[in-house]
Image (spheres, rainbow, N blue to C red):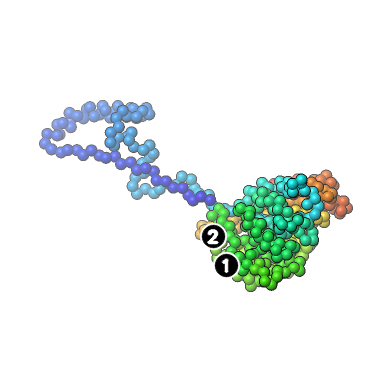
Amino acid sequence: MGQRNRYEQPRQRRRKRRRRRGSGRTLLLGVVAIPVVVVLCAALLLTNSGMELPFAGAGSAASQPSAPRQESGEASISSTPAAPQEITLLGAGDNMQHSPMLDACKTDSGYDFQPIYTQIKPTVEAADLAFVNQEMPCDPSVEPSGYPLFNAAPEMCEALVDTGFDVISEANNHMLDQGASGLQATIDYWKTQPGILQVGAYEDEADLETPHIVEKNGFKVAYLAVTEMTNGYTLPADSPLCILYTSETDTIERLIKAAKAQADIVVVSAHWGTEDTFELTDAQTTLAQQMVDWGADVIFGNHPHALQELTTLTRASDGATCPVIYAFGNLISTQYDPWNLVSGLLSITYARDESGKAVYQGMRFQPIVTYYEEGGENIHVVWLKDFTLEMAQQSRTWSRTGGQFTPDYAKSVVEQSIPAQYQDWS
């Protein structure tokens, strides 16, 4: 936000004509008095009528600025009060690319994923910084592929950028699906996208140790991404690439503290937990509180493909309120279990207090569902408030689950994981 604009009104100083003193001048003053009065009266009449005086000598009204006078010693006047500095951080879940989606989005010249995100695009674009977990590498030299060894089509990544996402996490269990070369290609690819910050796949130790900070609205926001697993794949011993695992708590602590020393807000993406469950693991809850105490202000969790608890944790050192969502679920996928298709966008607002510190102001969760038909056709993200029973009956999930996937079911998932005060159905 801009700083308060100030201006000083122009000062008017009239040069006073000095009166000459001497013998014989007193009588002359009396003689001149009557004509002077007449002239002054005429001047007043002209001035009140809005007309300029016909004479404009040095010190006359016509030669002065029209703004009100501000005498020496007066305080400057503010034009309008400055609005408090604020920033909105948006988070989203796992962005998946299963084979049916590839088939449905194929075109004569490549792929078109942009229609998938059309409904949520205005909300994502409106956020000051928007984060998403890209659940796969992107190696443009390799054919796009789905489960079990993912490789994103570049058009999918371009669609994320077009939708308004600014921060991409590559720290997840599929990040090594294309090996070390694929991970390096992914890092190189995201560098070609202007204004995009990629975290989670680090080029080397120096890259890992350097806080990744974005400046927006006068705030410095640092992002760090960690993962619990990489599906049994590991980097070669001689690879300079770095992945930060949740088990490396000493390193996580050091990196969070380093980021907090340079940034106003620290956001950690954590890929953790157990797939296809709403239940939290002890490892999730323990590490979450540790990261908050080390300096993390926001935690965006992913991996279970199910919407898990949204809450706040309190930092012991300063009593700060820190939002934590343990898992968003999927932003998009063609998984068919009904819980795989319920998610949401989380928007968190910070503002500066009187001391200049960034302070949590509140958050809102806007529920979404993934809709698609047989073969992945007509796949797109839909606001849950707009999801109807008729749509559910046309979805692929309806037939696969015996009619379990309904708007009421989706709402029940939101109700159990998202406290009512954070739900936004507008």
At label 2, counting other C-alpha atoms closer than 10 Å, the crowd grade (few under 14, some 14-19, many 20 or more) is few
Vertical relation: 334 (above or below) 65? below
Counting residues from the start of the chain, the first of labels 2 and 1 encountered is 1
Which residue is rendered at x = 76% and y = 59% of the image?
150
Where does residue 226 sit, x and y in percent of width and height? 67, 65
Q: Which mark is residue 154?
A: none
Q: Position of residue 181 (x, y in %)?
A: 70, 63
Q: Residue 243: horizontal and vertical position, in percent?
A: 67, 67
Viewer-side residue, 194 vs 309: 194
In front: label 2 or label 1:
1
Label 2 to label 1: alpha-carbon separation: 17 Å
**Which residue does the image show at 75% across and 55% down from the upper left?**
144
In the visual, does 376 lie left or right of 58? Answer: right
Q: Is residue 392 visible?
A: no
Mark 1 burial class by Cα count in 10 Å: few <14, some 14-19, many 20+:
some
- Name the residue located 63 percent from the left edge and 67 percent from the top edge: 204
Residue that numbered label 2 is attached to: 357
Return the residue at label 1: 258
Looking at the picture, which amino acid does disc 2 mark?
Answer: Lys
The amino acid sitting under disc 1 is: Ala
